[in-house]
Amino acid sequence: MPRESKRARLARMHDEYAILCEVFPEPRCALDFETPLQLLVATVLSAQTTDRRVNTVTPTLFAEYPDVEALAAADPERVEDIIHPIGFHHAKARNVIGLARRIVERFGGEVPSTMQELVTLPGVGRKTANVVLGNAFGVPGFPVDTHVMRVTGRLRWREDWAADPPDPVRIEREITACFPPGEWTDLSHRLILHGRATCHARRPACGGCPLRATCPSAESGMGVS
Ligand code: SF4
């Protein structure tokens, strides 16, 4: 592919995103939740597993611990028992109880709504904080997960598309600079949905991909996994 100017790449990004908007008109968070605390807990639990699996354990967890005070006082062994099917249950139980305690002690029982405060909670990094900001508080956030890293790399939406390992903070900065803040959360959802549906890690289904006409990695995937 001949070298692409920044302006041409930006135009292509917006054209490709318009197609993703048609394919996924109403994206939503795949984790089941009703409150910011539930989304925060579910997102922490989703590390190294699928959202679908998390959704199988959270109904019991949220029923037994309906508020932050109850979770802060939870018996770790009982929480481990409930979340055992999703793996890493020791560390995840420690994190969700720990973050509940921190919310009670430092934030008056309310989940904080800023990036700076959220990342002080146990088990919460920028990705989790962006999920909570965008989906629970309506604050623009662009979560960068493995799908977002892979898809933005294959589409060469970013300068460092070949970086190994990719830098999620740099990806967040580069991609959000190209779209209005109001679009960031849905943009992340759509990239994740496209990664799950078509642009798979091992064998991207380029033949049926709606972005095939302009994707620089069509057919090859270009080794970005
Ligand atoms: S053409 Fe292939 S590599 Fe490019 S976005 Fe589609 S599935 Fe992914």
Image (cartoon, rainbow, N blue to C red):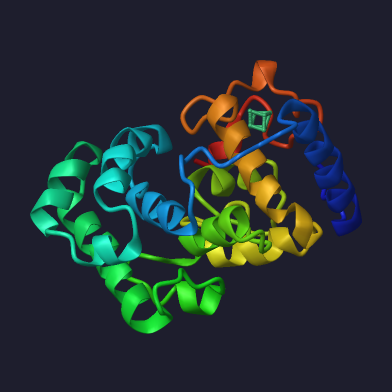
Seen in the picture, residue 174 relative to 35 is either above or below; the reply is below
- Determine the image quadrant of residue 95: bottom left
Ligand 1 shows up in the quarter that is top right
Front-lying residue, 194 or 57: 57
**Relative horizontal placement of residue 202, taking residue 56 as reference (left or right):** right
Q: Residue furthest left?
A: 77
Residue 144 in view in this figure:
yes
Vertical order, 73 against 158 (above or below): below
Q: Nearer the viewer, residue 132 or 194?
A: 132
Identify the residue at horizontal 76%, vertical 52% (top origin). Answer: 183
Residue occupying the point 65% across, 22% down: 206
Judging depth in this view, the residue of 69 and 46 nearest the camera is: 69
Determine whether 72 is above or below 151 in the image: below
Up/down of 133 relative to 153, above or below: below
Residue 6 image point, x, y percent: 85, 58
The x and y percentages for residue 215 are 74, 34
